[in-house]
Amino acid sequence: MEVGMKRTDYLSWDEYFMGIALLAGLRSKDPGTQVGACIVSQKNKILSIGYNGMPTGCSDDEMPWDRENENPLQTKYMYVCHAELNAILNNAGASLQGAKLYVSLFPCNDCAKAIIQSGIKEVIYQCDKYADMPPYIASKRMLDMAGVAYRQLPHSGRTVTLEL
Ligand SMILES: Nc1ccn([C@H]2C[C@H](O)[C@@H](COP(=O)(O)O)O2)c(=O)n1
Ligand SMILES: [Zn+2]
């Protein structure tokens, strides 16, 4: 009996989970930067997903989305919940000990604290556009000290088109 060959152009695990993080980011209402995160167990099972957005019950239409305003209360930074924190909090009770976090943008210092405390052991990120800013320098300092590994997933050059 002849045996068919398996597909060879399937997504790698890294491409699959980063793809899911990027897709989650498309749910974000932030006009500036859309971030998505996907938490995965050591056995490559998806544990949780999140994207950056206003806290539950805080209307996307009433909260500000501006980066700058003379009144800091009128900027998004006071309110928006980051993708990584949402993914950690959205997790339906499973332990995150030893888990991996795929995220489209390197985590800030606040998210780094939550990552460390939740037991996540590896961060895989795509973009690090704020690397020179103190929250991101502090983030790396904490992740290094706490033994949380991080690595950038370079663009593979592949484009995935979804027809919805
Ligand atoms: N690792 C990160 C970094 C940022 N965010 C969120 C926070 C804001 O909604 C947006 C950044 O806005 P920008 O200053 O670029 O206009 O991204 C996140 O969820 N995770
Ligand atoms: Zn953050």
Image: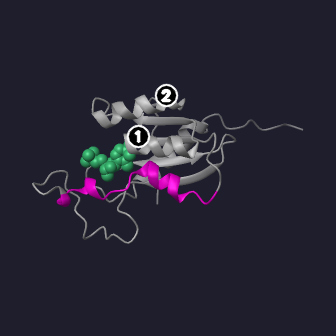
For label 1, count other residues whose C-alpha is less than 10 Å away and answer few (under 14), some (14-19) or many (20+).
Answer: many
Ranked by sequence position, the earlier of labels 2 and 1 is 1
Q: Let me know if residue 115 is in the magenta part.
A: no
Q: Is residue 120 left or right of residue 1?
A: left
Please determine whether, in this image, residue 162 is positioned above or below residue 115. below
Q: Which one is nearer the viewer's eye here, 126 or 145?
A: 145
Magenta stretch, residue numbers: 73-93
Please determine whether, in this image, residue 57 is positioned above or below residue 152. below
Q: Quadrant of the N terminus?
A: top right
The amino acid at mark 2 is Met
Label 2 vs label 1, nearer the camera: 2
Q: Let me know if residue 86 is in the magenta part.
A: yes
Query: Pointer 1: what residue?
Result: 107
Where residue 151 appears, x then y in whole percent? Answer: 49, 29
Query: Pointer 2: what residue?
Result: 145
Q: Does mark 1's beta carbon lie closer than 8 Å to ligand 1?
A: yes
Where residue 37 appears, x then y in whole percent? Answer: 47, 48
Please determine whether, in this image, residue 30 is positioned above or below residue 109. below
Q: Which one is nearer the viewer's eye here, 132 or 146?
A: 146
| Residue at x-position 36% and y-position 33% | 138
**Label for residue 32?**
none
Classify mark 1: helix, strand or loop. loop
The amino acid at mark 1 is Pro
Q: Is residue 143 left or right of residue 105?
A: right
Q: Main secondary structure of the magenta part?
A: helix
